Each structure stands twice: as C-alpha cells, then as structure tokens.
Image (cartoon, helix red, strand yellow):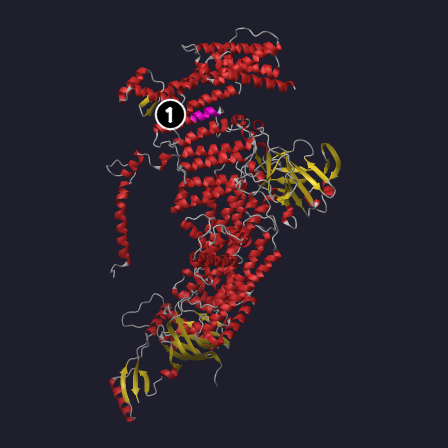
Amino acid sequence: MFEANPYNLGWAILQWVAALAVSGILALLVGFVISYLALGKKAPAAIKDTLKRGFDDLTKLSGRRIGALAYLALKESLARRALYVLGTFIVLFMAANLFLRTPEQDVPAKPYVSFVLTVVQWLLIPVALLLSCWGLPADIKDRSLHTVVTKPVRRSEIVIGRMLGYGLMTTMVLVVVALFGWVWIKRVVPARSQAQLISRVPVFSSADDVKDAFFFIDRAGNRQQFAVNVGDIWDHRSFIEGQTNSRAVWQFENLNPSRIGDDLRIEYRFEAFRSHKGNVDEGEGVRFRLFFVNEAKKLRVPFPQTGAGVEIREFTQETVRGATAGTEEEQAVLRIPRELRAEVAGDPSATGEKVDLFTDVMDNGKLQVEVVCLDAGQYVGAARTDLFIRLPDRPFAASYFKAMFGIWLMVLLVIMIGTTASTFLKGPVATLLTFGLVILGSPLRSYMEEQYTDRYQKGEVLGGGMLESAYRLVTQMNQQSPLPENFGTKTIQVLDEGVFSGLAIVRNVIPDFRHFNMTEYVANGFDVPFNDAGAAVLPSIMTVLGFFIPCVILGYFSLQLRELESK
Amino acid sequence: MQAETVIDVRNLSKVYRDFWGRKKVQALNALELNVRKGEVFGLLGPNGSGKTTTLKLLLGLLFPTEGEVTVLGKPAHDVTKNERIGYLPEESYLYRFLNADETLDFYGRLFDMPASVRKERRDELIKLVKIEGARRRPLKEYSKGMTRRIGLAQALINDPELVLLDEPTSGLDPLGTRDMKDLIIRLKEQGKTVVMCSHLLADVQDVCDRIAILYGGELKVMGGVKDLLESQDETQLLTSTLNDEAIKEVEAVLKKHGAQLKQVAHPTSTLEELFLRTVKESQERPGRRFSPGERPGQSDSRPAQAAVKS
Amino acid sequence: MSRLTSRQRQLVYLTGILVLMAPIIVLGMPTTQQSGNLGIIAQKRLEYELGEPSLGNVDPASATMNLVLLGLRGVAANILWMEADHLKDTKNWSQLKSTVESIILLQPHFQSVWKFQAWNLGYNVSAECDAVPDRYYWVKEGVKFLTRGTERNTKVPELFHDLGDYYGKKIGRADEHVLFRQYFIVDPDEARWKGGPDEEINPNGIDNYLVAKDWYLSANDKVTGGLIEQHKMAWPIFANYPFRSQMDYATIRQEEGKFGDVTSEAWRTGYREWTEEYGRMDFATPGGVVRFEATEDEIARLSEQDGFPFEEKLHWLDRYQNMVNYRYWRLRCNVEGNADMAGARGDLANGRRLYREVQDMEGARAALYSSLEKFQRVVDTYRLPDGTSQLLNDETDLTESILKGILIWRSIVKDVFGEEIPAEYPMDELWNEPRYEALRVELEQQFNAWQGTMAR
C-alpha cells in the first residue's frame, strides 16, 4: 500500500492519546462498577490502592529482573523448538523452484523478491503467535509462575520480560532468514533481471492540496481531476487524447538541485491506449512529449527538444526485454540535461532561447511538468504516481533490509499483542484473538476502511450494512434496489447503524498492519520511504510504540488483578 | 517477653467460586493466626484442610475473600515483602529446561542480586542441598528428591528472614528428610522464621516449636508442640535390661509410693532411626551385610522401657 | 456404563478400522502380484487409464501441495483465482503469472484452468501492451503455459487444438501478424536467442503454420485414439484443421510475395493430404458413414455395410462436403500446385511491382502479358463441359486479381505506349464477361482515382 502522501504524525499522536484516554476512562468505570459490586463501600479505597500500586509497578522497573525474565522466555522458546522454523524456511526455499518455475531467463526479479518477503512474513507470524500466546498460559498452568511471582517481581516486569524475550528470539530467526533470503535472491534471480534489483528513490509530485499535485487539462483547456476513461476496470489511470489540448500536469515542490545530480532523471509508468491500430506492422508505439513549464516566466521547455517524441515503454517491471535489460530505456527513464532551449510560442520548428532547467525553469524548488500525447486518436494514460523524479539510486540492500525491518516491527507487534492476550486468555484463544487482529489489520483492513469511507464520507454503502447485505443475499435482491418499507427492514437498518458505529470506534484501536508491508516497494525496485501514509518506516515504528504502552498496561493489570491459581 | 510478630492473620476467609461466581468451596473460614520471629511454625491438617491455601494467601498468590494478612509488616500483595521471603512450593514448580546453575542464577537475578553475589550464593546452596554432581543437567532429568533439593535452594537464594515451606519433605527419601529437618533446625538457629505445612506428623513433631491444626478450613488447635504433647499424669523410666526379679522389686517400690506399673517392654526404635543407622553404617563400612537377628548400631546392653502411672 | 478400559476400547476401534480397511487394502494392492482378484482396483485403474500418471506427467510439487492442503484445495484455488483476477485488473502481469502457476499446482488436470489462464496471458495481457515485442512476449507466455498443460494432460484433445490456434491464428492472423511471424523465426529477444527463434516454442525454426499443423495433428490423434472427447466443434471441421493449416502456410507465402517452388510444393502437399488423408477419413452422418474422397463403388459398399440407401448417403456426403467446403479446397490446392499457376501469380506480382514501384513500363507490360498467358493455360485446364472454367466460377479473389492485371496491362498499352488494345489477348474472356461488368467498372474507378492522386 503506497499513498505518496506523508504520514500525519501529529494527528496520529493526537488520535493515540484520545484512544488511550477513552479506553482508560472506560476501564476505570468498568473497574469501579465491578469492585463496587464486590466490595461495596470499600471500593474507592481499593481502586485507589490498585492504581497506586499500578503506578509503582509500571514505573519502578528493574532492568536486571526484566533481563532475567527475557532470558527465561528466550530459553523457553529454544526449548519449544522455535528454531525448527528455520529448517522449514530453508526447505521451502529449496522447493521454491517448483513454485516459481525457475530457471527461466526472462522472469523479472519481482516475483522472486515478493516470494521471499511474503514467505518470511507468513513464516514468522505463526512463530510469533505460538511463542507469545502459549508461553504465559503454560507457565501459569505448570505453576512455574508461582515460584516467580513469590520473588520480588513486578507483574509488569513479567509482561515486558516476555515480550522482550520472544522479541529477541524472533529477531535472531529473522536475521538468519533475512540474510538467507538475500543470498537466495542474489543467486536465483536470472542474470538479466539482476538489474531490476535496485532501490529507486522517487520524488513524487506534491502540494499542500493534493489536487494541485496532479491534474489534467481537457480538450477545452479546463482543469479537471480526471481525464478520459477508456473503459479499463482499473480506474487508476486517466487518459489524455493525442494531438489535442489535453495534458497531464504534475507539480513538484521542495526540489533540491544538489540532490538531483547533473541531469534530471524522470521515470514514467504511462500506459498507451489505441483507438485505432495505427501503423502496427512497423511496430510504432504511441508517443508523448514532456514540457517543463514556468508559467510566471511564460516558459515552456519541451523534451525531447525536437523530433517525434518518446515512444511509451510500458510495464517495465513485468517483463525482461532482451538487449535493453537493465538500461534506463528499459526502466522507462528519461535523462534530461540541464541546458535546454525553450519553445517559441506558435512555431514548433523554431528553437527558442537557452534555459537552465534548475535555475530558470525551476522556481524556488517548484517545477511543473506536463505531458502531451503526440499521436492523433491515441491516448496516454497516467496517474499521479506515474511520473516521478528519480534521485540517485540506493543499493538494493537498502530497500530489502528496510522491508525486513518492517517485518521485524510487525512481528514485534504480534508478539506484544499475543503476550498481552495471553495474560488473560488461554493459549488457543489468545492465538485466535491475535491472529484475528492480524487478519483484520492487514488483508481485511482495506475492506474495513472502504466500508468506513463509504458510510461516513460518501454517506452510503452499496448494499447496506452487515444485516442488510445478509438480507439481500438471502432474498437474492439487487444491491441497488430499495429495501421494502416495513418494521423488519427498519430494525435491520438501525442495527446496522450500530455495527457501523462499532466499526468507526474499533477502527481506531485495531492496528493497521498495512504499514508494515513494504514488499511492493522492494519487489518493484523502489526504496522504502521513511515517511508515507501507506507502508513506510515511520508509521511502522509509531504503530509499534503506540501499542507497546497500552499492551504493557493491559497485560500488567490483567496479571495483577487475577489469581494465578488455575482452579 | 513476647517476640516480634512476623505473620499476622486476622479473620481470614477464602471462598473459591466457579465461573458464574457461585460459591464452590469454603477453603478457609475466619482464620486467626500469628507467627513469631525465630520460631518454626507447623501448619497441620489432612488434605484439603486449607494449609496450602493459607500459604498462598500469605504470599499474595490468592486474594482473600475476607480478612487481613500482614507479612513482615506489609500487606500480602506487596511485592517488596518478597525480598525477605523464601518459598518452597508443594511441588517444585521450576523451569524444566534450565539446569541447576541457570535456575539459581535466574532466581538470583529476580532478587536484583549482582552477578558476583549470585555466583557465591549459588555455589553455597548447591553444596548445601548436595546436588553438586548434577548442577549442569537440565531439571527435567532430575529425580523427585533432587527437584525438591533444588527447589529448596531457590527458596534460600536471597537468604530470607521468613521461609515458607509447603510439604518440605514430600518426595524425599528418609536421608533427604533428615537433611531437610536438620536444615530447618539450622535455619531456626540462624534466627530465621520458618513456616511449614505438612501432613507428616513425625516431621512436624521433630522440628516445630508451635503448630496449628486445620480441619475443613477452620483452626482447631494451636500451641507449642511440647505443651500439646506432654501428658502430665504419667512418668517414663528407661533402664538397662532388668530381669523379672528386679522388675518385681521395682513394682514393689512403686507401690510404696502409691504408683502403679502399667507396662514393661523393650523399647522399639522408630523405623526412621533404624533406616538412618543402616545407611550410616553402610557408608562407613561398605559391603557389609547384616545377618538375621543382628541390628545395626545395636548396643550390647539393651535398655528396657517402662511406662509408669503415678 | 461401559465396562471396557480405555486400552480395550482402543483395541476395539483398531479392529474396526482394520476390518473396514481390509477390502480396500486387498482390492487396491499393486498389480504386479498376479494373484486373481487381488489388486483389482489397480488393474481397473490401468485398464480405464484413470491413474494420475496416465493423465500426463506427475508434478511432485503439485502432489505435495494437494497433500498439504488436505481438503482445502478448492478454497485455496478460489482465493488464488480471485487474486489472479485482481492482479490482472491492476496490470501486475509478472505476479499474475506466478499466481497462475500456483493455481495450476492445485488443479493440474482441470482443462478449463489451462485454457482460461493461457488465454489470459496470451490474449488479454498481450493486448494490454502497446509495443509489439511485448505483445509477442506474452503470446509466447500463453503458448508456453498451454504447452505445459498438454504435457500434464496428454489425453485432452482441446488443449492440443488450442495450441494449434495459438500458433496458427494468434501468431498468424493477429493484427500484428506480419511482425509476429518474423519474430517467430527471429525472436526479438536477440540477446538470448542470438537471432534465432525462441527454442522453447519453435526449436526447429519453421513456419508458425507448420507448427500449428503438428499440434492440430496431435489433437486429431487424441480424439481418434483417446479417452477424452472434444466439444469444441463438429468433428469433420475439427479434423480438417491440420490440413487447412498447411494451406494457410502456402497462402501466406503467396501473400508475402513468395511464389517459388517451396510455395508450389506446399500447395501440392496440401492437395495430397486433403485428398489422401483427410479425404479418406470416415465421418458419421445421419446417413451413416461417409468418406469425402469416396468413389461411387466405395459409397455403394458403405451403404451396403450400414444399410443406408445409396441416394441418402450421397445426399449426406454432399452436405458434409459443403460443411467443410471440401471441393473448393480440393480444387484450390490442385490449381495452386500447378506450375503455370505459380508462374502466373509470380509474373502478375512482378508486373504490378515494376509498374508501380520501378516504373519500368516495358518490363511491366511483358510480365503482365506473360502472367495472363499462364492464367489462360490454367483456366483452360479446368474448363468444364459447358465451356466455363471451374476456376473462374469458384475463385472470386482470383478473378479480381486477373482483372486488375488486365486493367494495368491495358493502361500501359493504351496510355503509356499509345497503342491500340489487340482484339484478342489472353484472358480477354474474363474482361468481356458480362457477369464481371460491375466489378470491372468498380476496379477501373479505383484505378483512375489512384492515378489521380499520383498525378497531383
């Protein structure tokens, strides 16, 4: 998941504080009611005492004790054969050839990379689940925890120690697996696709209002958010028609010429759409031309400066094409020199004044790039992320290990949640709960967000909520046809509204696992961004930190407030 | 002078409830108890009488339904009191994948003890409980007795002021039992307070200063062992072997003093004593077997025993 | 209630299991033991070719996957299928391909999977690309995928026939067929194939229509010799694909201006195969068995054999011949295989080229005249008793070509050299034939219009 918009850290922290405060107050209220029922008038004193103890136990921690408990969890994991997973992993990789049909010389690098990262993820999640969810309950059941808690150990230390120990264990496994995967990729990716193992550093168009970062100009010269729809199921790209006024416009800001290098490298991901065959026997592609525009100075600088324009090179990550493999042409990169000549208005054949791209056209770090299609009757499709400035590349290792770092953070989060769940649930139930959160947080998260946006931003969900959908399914009713007006359907809608409100609340506390999944970047040869609203390093770190504190608090209180005697 | 109170239990009740909060068992009912510094205190009672529950309430493993518990002047749920307590659970609930060294080191770290102190304590205790030969084997390979020993060692890792022992001799062979009892007495000599619960009365009798007998969750008897066992209306004499004539003369003398000879017999030793003697001699003179009728550690002049009712 | 100990109960269960399994074990024993009823399941499996090895190659990975998934194979396949659709929609071709590989691991003997996903790669993905080499790359992917399908399912005729379609129709008739056919001989991935063909799909470097013919032939073999039926089309049509492919090969050579011996030989091979192989095949019709190339005696014998009246059999033979256009193709092969015909077509093409491109009017005039002479000879060869030529009756394309030839020749004679058109010249019967009056006028108008643009 990639959004090309920065992660809103301030907002996230605010939301976190709010969620924490609300849950804290709720927990206090529930605690008060329960203790009032049990203790009567002594309840306030008991709560005060519990909170005071809680504060002590959560703040006066001993590093040595936590270390000892972490060491214990580590030894326990080893005793529970956690390392078998390494064996499984290696066997899987030896068998991987069977899945990927290697060696085929013209397989691009992408499937190999995403295979490794996906396997690592789905191998480590069960390990983390099994370790973290079953450790404490087993300890309580065997009563070995009795011996521990009769020592001057704070229960918060037990929770943190466990998290730390399992974390260390999985870290060790991950390091081995990551290195193995690295060597495997380097060895198995066909020689011709090795060039695709890079880490591009893209700069995408941006603006305070995202609508200014990318837009279209239609035939009539009016600004639009969308251009022509050519009937593609995937509405990611909009298409501009050739030999008309239609243009796609990107606006970059905060560009720093010293970081860009000598030439400006622009990479594109356009798609061609033909409304007529064209000169297919000569194999001519649909062509486009770039313009660098400075509207204040009325400068329009074309690229290529003369000639027939650039033939679109499509789907560069999806195939390996012969002689050009690994070249910039293969990667659809345009290398644009600084020294260019501006266009003379109304006379395409004349050469205009000499300009410097960085000093004359770029204005205070801002640069406007326009794309026109050159073939009449043909179309060029583009989306905001389909054109970006490429800063000097980083080594493939940069993105690969950043993605592994993301997986590491995700596994830590799973361990934290699993350990917390195991303080109040038995092993199997804790596993189910944690795994459920993982599923809700990653594959189902997008669906959840979609429902949420439909309901609360667009105002209507097609086919209605949970019960309404079920009703439509059973009665085989179309999604659009109105429900019959009666008491039953009214009830259904009211109940569904409740479900939606629940969703709106729960959405804020279920971790967004999509932040951690950086596979797409690496597989497509991009650097993993530090700060992006989608998958990126910063939101991943913040998510883990954000869950650490409530997990420890929750784990502490549920260990503290229960009798460890399992009777 | 009344010694300082180490454990103070007031009106302590514990009710176990089922999932729905319905009362299942009344494990303890209005227990009043106190243990003084420096004594060995025995909690007795049949299975299910509430001994272990009491210990767990003292340790804060269970929460009282009613009443108050103060241990070393602090409430039971205060973890800092544990710094001065050693606890040997009923069965040694230890981590089976650790070896003896690792186990002691682990518990030492839980007391926040620096490495040098831990090492010292560890070596000392391993010698004390006599498991030097097995210190590097994981606990899962240990016999029951060895597990008890390492359990005891971990209970003493912090040199505690108060030692709580739950069935300390269960699973031990007589030799081990004797070691354990010797150790308890040594702890007492060091001025530590020991609370043990057991249903092996002989063990309790041998080491305890005071006992409490629980039945069905209620305190039935509490007091000093001597006070409770001594019968004031009988006198026991122990002499070297007497012939019938001498016995008759003794009987006559007794009559003169208005007392009555109730029983004349050779004293029987306890099986425990016999066992211990046998083992001891076997260790001193290996390879020797005792012929029938011969008894180890037997003195030539056998004492006769007489119970006299005055 | 039960007085059995758990050990005893376990024994009871075990006995029960053994008793229930005994027949399966006995019947399912390997057949190597020649012992009466033992191993009857294995024997039957062999007899009816139901074992997996008899369906095609066994892939160990596929077998393992199915074992690991236990009963969840269908669920997994569904999820993967949805994933594949999503990847296709979002144009993630390389991952689409690897997902399709996973689907195939799960359902290796489900022919629709092979067909559908091969179509996805070879047609849908291919069409999404703009560059012709990219399109060709994905056609090849589809072909390679389907080839593996035939290896895993050696008895499914439709997969073989589909492959014939990929080689013949996709490579040979797509909009991009001119380039595709070149790429088939000289792969655009020159770094890998060093100026030769992609050996995975064309190891011998031959024409795509000939490769297609081989696949169609094997498809026919699977139908006639195999267990699995084809439901693609009527059998007489299905069966003629390899032979038609041979003709397609000859035709496209002519279209590409190759009129030499190879082309003539290709036509003659086509004629031989059409009449001696296809024409000798037996087809079941409502009027019993018919044979396209059957003599009257043979028809009489066939009608004796299956009891259908001679007249009825003739009727059905005629209908079936019409269905596959049998007589037309027979004649076409026969004519095109004629040396004069090849010469005529060659001269005609040469004359047109000299006139239009080289502007060598002398040469053009001679070539066109020679072409018309040869056409005349061929037409005379196929003259019917009523005086008309069978060739001109059936072949509108041919008549059009000849008319164009006459038109250009006449224009050269009259307009370039300023001579009178001779009263008689070869093929003048066609020029003067009233049936073609309309066509002739239309061609003249086109020709004049074209000349007009040239003059401007």
> Residue A84's x, y, as percent?
45, 51
Does the magenta segment cover residue C281?
A: no
Disc 1 element: helix
Residue C171 appears anywhere in the view: yes
> Residue C192's x, y, as percent?
54, 31
Residue A67 appears anywhere in the view: no
> Residue A495's x, y, as percent?
46, 58
Residue C424, relative to residue C81: is it above or below? above
In this orientation, which residue lies closer to the viewer: A420 or C414?
C414
Number of labelled discs? Answer: 1
Residue A547, relative to residue C343: is it above or below? below
In this orientation, which residue lies closer to the viewer: C40 or C94?
C94
Which quadrant of the view contains residue A487? bottom left
Q: Which residues are magenta?
A: C208-214
Q: Please state if C222 lies on the left or on the right of A176 as rendered.
A: left
Residue B263, relative to residue B50: is it above or below? below
Q: Residue at x 35, y 27 (%)?
A: C224
> Residue C382's x, y, as percent?
43, 11
Residue highlighted by disc 1? C236
Which quadrant of the view contains residue C214? top left
The amino acid at mark 1 is: Pro
Q: Please state if A335 lies on the left or on the right of A410 as rendered.
A: right
In this orientation, which residue lies closer to the viewer: C389 or C143?
C389
